[in-house]
Image (cartoon, helix red, strand yellow):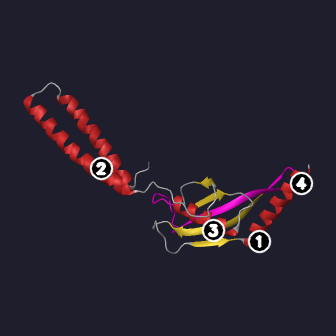
Amino acid sequence: MLLSPSEFGQLAEAMGAFVALAALITAVAFWQQWGWRFRMVGVTLFSVVLTVGLFALSLEPITRTSITGAVPYKVVYDRSSNQVVVAVRPTITASELEATLRQAGANLFSSGRSAQGQTQLIVRARTVVHPRLGLSKPIYLGQIKRSLRLRNDPNQSVEIMMANLQEASQIAATASSVKDAA
């Protein structure tokens, strides 16, 4: 079960109340010179650490976006800046590629990316085909440009390189038919 950011916020509030109660008990324990007062200091401070962690999880969503029609992809280049490259299978269709790019753009968004003066995150999709034995050819199939600042960017633009998509499909089909013949 994955908790939502609002649920982490509620847990942080509850832990904040527990911290206040633990701090009060700690103060009374010191005032009364009880023997376990130093244990209460540990409980209180550990509770503060947990509360800060829960609060931090309430700020940034950790859930993944799932878009209908998207296919699995692997991140092959990401240096936490404004450019990311994902790998997809060579037989992907145009509609699957668009959905996959939108999903990757949403999932790879982070407000902590180093923009280096740029305002857009660019996620490119590529595949690797093998036109003949011993030769690998990377082909870029498309890209999505989205804001580095807005999580729900209304101005996302998806570009699909249809000629490259057809080339990758043809080479993949040729390679699989050669494999089947052998």
Mark 1 or 3: the one toward you: 3
User: Dot 1: few (<14), some (14–19), or many (≥20) neighbours within 10 Å?
Assistant: few
Tags 2 and 3 touching, CB below 8 Å: no
Residue underneath mark 2: 12
Mark 4 or 2: the one toward you: 4
Is residue 74 something one can see in this rendering? yes
In the rendered view, would you say 10 is above or below 32? below
In the rendered view, would you say 162 is above or below 57? below
Mark before the other along the chain sequence, 1 or 3: 3
The picture places residue 33, in percent across and down from the top left corner, at 10, 28
> At 89% from the left edge and 54% from the top edge, which residue is drawn?
178
Question: As rendered, which of 131 and 180 lies closer to the eye?
Answer: 180
The picture places residue 49, in percent across and down from the top left corner, at 31, 42
Mark before the other along the chain sequence, 4 or 2: 2
Q: Secondary structure at mark 4?
A: helix
Residue underneath mark 3: 98
